Image (tube, grey):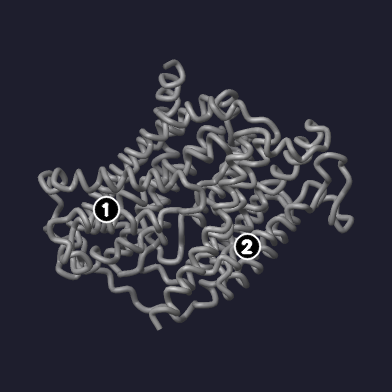
Amino acid sequence: MDLWMNAVSDVFTLTNLSAILFGTVFGIIMGCLPGMSSTMSIAIIIPFTFTMDPATGIILLAAIYCASVYGGSISAILLNTPGTPAGAATVLDGYPLSQKGESGRVLGVSAVASGLGGIISAIILSTTAPFLADQALRFGAAEYFAVAIFGISVVSSLGGKNPIKGLMAGVFGILIATVGLDPIVGYPRYTLGEPELNGGFSLIPVLIGLFSASQSFVLIKNAGKDKDATVEDVSSNSRVTFGETLKLLPNISRSSLIGTFIGIIPGIGGDPAAFVAYNEAMRWSKNPKNFGKGEIGGVAAPEAANNAVTGGALIPLLTLGIPGNTVTAILIGGLLIHGLRPGPMLFEENGDVVYSLFISLLVTNILFMVFGLAFTKYFAAVLKVPSRILGPIILMLSIIGAYAIHNSYFDIWIMLIFGFIGYLFRQINVPTTPIVLALILGPIAEESFRQALLQGGGEMSIFVTRPITLVFLVLAVISFFTPFVRDLIGSRKLKKSN
């Protein structure tokens, strides 16, 4: 209870409330922009949190995360183009309703459903995460190795329709994770004689390069090819009513639980959660035939679900150090630069920061719900920013951010190199998230594996005789091969149908 009271007093300070306010506005604006994402939004801002108090920095990043997921619905509803991937399901009914002149009502429902989904997931996060962290305190080196391998195993799922591409990116990430001093004997590996590489590739410049700089290259390449964005009028007299919100509460509640549960599962993310919730809403609806033609329940369900994923994805991140999705993989970088290592000890050593994060999530979701109802038409104006302006701005912020961490020009070059790699990967449709996942979890897996072997006298049996370790390794095998099995079954069904 003392931690909760201290967290409330910490959050409701001018500094932290300002961080929440800025993060909410910035997140909504970035989420609005087609092609941008929560991942890129956070990658740009992480370096600027370096000089902040740890609690303030994490609160800012969490606010951007939540608000940017909601922001994606604005362009989905008004332009038929989701600002973030998680907003793809919102397009199905949001845009048809907008074309009928109900944009104000639809955006209102989106704001309310998103806010309530985030609040429900934040409550579940704050009540279950401490208990799970207590259980995780029993972990030793073998358990940490198994957990890290389980986290890495989702790389095949992150490849989308082609798990091989996810695997390729993951292997590349593990290779670059080996650069630097050996974690046990301290011998330099693949450093090419550069002292700057003794500590390996700095995480933040790599993140900024892969996500933000690569996106700026895409925008700059497409400069001059912009089509004028025709934004539907959002000053319509049509507004969501309290009565309509009450009718949608069962749909929103069910979708929020779906989103939270799916968010807990590493490697799934907000996109599948939104579509699962959409399908369930259609199944439970009295008018399922209206879905896809302009059904308000088809907007509430995916918006509640994809925002509920935010709290769910933080559960494995905070308790076990496993990123639940792409964005939380980036958030690990934000925690690490403040000396906060995700895992059960985070609750023991930095409980004040964790509980401040819980309270800030509730405040953020309430705030963007209010903003969404009151100021959507102003945020929608951002949709008209051309890529020839947006691309150079993002590249400039990427350069400043890469330099700000260590005041090093070497980091700028690293950022640009990985920006070019990220750009090439985009051209051949290879995901970059597995690289980050492997870069973060690879060293943990290696160090824990070798420590476990030392503890077990060099016997591999230590990994199968400890129940928790064995369970996570079995889950890792299932997680890794599931996409391949799914593709195999799908190809066989396709052959039979032909």
Report the front residue among 204 and 454: 454
- Quadrant in the rendering for residue 249: top left
Q: In which quarter of the image is the C terminus?
A: bottom left
Inspect the image, locate mark 2, and give the three-letter code of the amino acid beneath it: Leu
Q: Eyeballing the image, is 383 above or below 457?
A: below
Q: Is residue 393 visible?
A: no
Report the front residue among 422 and 150: 150
Label 2 – label 1 distance at C-alpha: 32 Å
Q: Name the residue under label 2.
A: 167
Report the front residue among 194 and 229: 194
Horizontal side of 473 relative to 497 (left or right) equals right
Mark 2 surroundings: few (<14), some (14-19) or many (≥20) residues within 10 A: many
Q: What element carries label 2?
A: helix
Q: In which quarter of the image is the N terminus?
A: top left
Inspect the image, locate mark 1, and give the three-letter code of the amino acid beneath it: Ala
Measuring from the top left, give residue 122's x and y in whole percent: 38, 36
**Nearer mark to the viewer, of 2 and 1:** 2
